[in-house]
Amino acid sequence: MHILHNGDALQWMKSLEAASVDCVFVDLPYFGVVSEDWDNQWKDRNEYLDWVVSLAHEWKRITKSNSSIFLFCDEKMEAYIQVRLDEYFLLLNKIVWFKRNNLPQKNAHLLRTFAPMTERALFYTTQYDSTGWEAVKLDMNNFMPLREYFKEFQAALGLSKKQIVERIGQRADHAFRYDSTQWDLPTEETYQELVSLNLHGFQPKEYEALRQEYEALRQEYEALRLEYEALRRPFNADKKTWDVIEFPIIGGDENTEHPTTKPLGLYRRILSVITEPNQVVLDCCMGSGTAGVVALELGRSFLGCEIDPKYFSIAQARIKKAAQSPSFLTLPNNRLQPTAFGVGTQASFPLLGGTQAEESSATFGGA
């Protein structure tokens, strides 16, 4: 299902339930880049940054523990925004969109600066991104029988870990980190060298018995590993998932009356990597609704807000069309139903609060 709201983004987000959004995907007003009122509503940079931070407060509240935050921003504001948002989220990438057919290239020789052929974005997460197996290994209660065995083994040797490493080499180190997240079973070769030392009557186990015990415990933890994997932040990378995205500027068939509409293909590329089907994508500055169109095309749920009635109507029409397209109805989440929305209203959505959001005099832009 999708919700479109024509009103103040900040007030609307305050009506949403905590931990209900999987991905914040937003094309912020760049501040002073275009002549529209919505891009020039702040008196200075600090006031603009304070507004961005007020949005971040709500993003922090409504996102989940494994959510992604992806925001486009102006190249001259990117560093200032990053300093502020680093206080709230973990920065993963600074993304460059290279617009290979951008118009300034034709007049580059006439400029007094390098021709602007790029736009910038910041990619954040709310989660430290360990793998499922890393999460299992970081639990020092795991592999406890083997940890205890190597503790007893060291006691029988009567040597410190440093002395063992001096005799066998660094490869023996991890076997005796039994009180550490870095414990691991030694190789058979290393174990046989350890067994050849004076064990003062201690009866060592056969290596194959240790290996089988290790594998049995690994299999026991497999379900836990899969559970951890399911909780990880989605990221569907391919061989060209780079921090520089080459994509042409919007073509005439996709353009809208909104002056900063971005290409559908660019959004498809990014959202298909950082989200999964049935997840909830939020764009609080949706402009002409490009993020909503792509979210529905990809089988995601969408929450979008735009204050300008003109742009809201454009977004509403585009998203309604996407929701009624044959491709959408055959997606895995075809349980989603298109709905119609009036100005200053929102539809019900089972994952979120159904309170009525009010219009505001604040102005917000988007793509």
Image (tube, grey):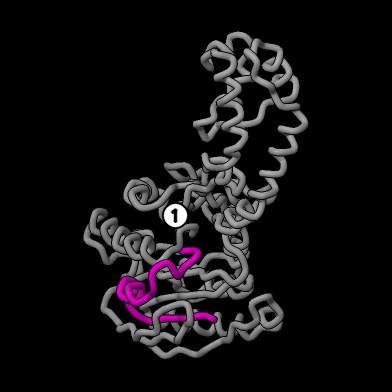
**Above or below 224: residue 205:** above
State which region is magenta.
1-25
Residue toward you, 272 or 29 = 272
Which residue is outermost to the front?
Answer: 201
Residue toward you, 303 or 268 = 303
Please state the horizontal and vertical placement of residue 134, each as a whole percent of the image.
58, 43
**Above or below 240: residue 277:** below
**Above or below 257: residue 44:** above
- Residue beneath the point at 52% across and 88% down: 339
Inspect this view and state whether residue 224 appears.
yes
Please state the horizontal and vertical placement of residue 250, each as a whole percent of the image.
58, 65
- Residue beneath the point at 59% across and 51% down: 245
Inspect this view and state whether residue 314 appears.
no
Residue 348 in which image quadrant: bottom left
Relative placement, left or right, of 28 versus 151 is: left
Badge 1 density bin: few <14, some 14–19, many ≥20, Cα 10 Å: some
The residue carrying mark 1 is 126
User: What's the residue type where badge 1 is placed?
Assistant: Thr
Residue toward you, 21 or 34 = 21
Please state the horizontal and vertical placement of residue 236, each as a whole percent of the image.
64, 55
Q: For the residue labelled by badge 1, is the local secondary structure a helix, a strand or a loop?
A: loop
Please state the horizontal and vertical placement of residue 99, each as a whole percent of the image.
57, 53
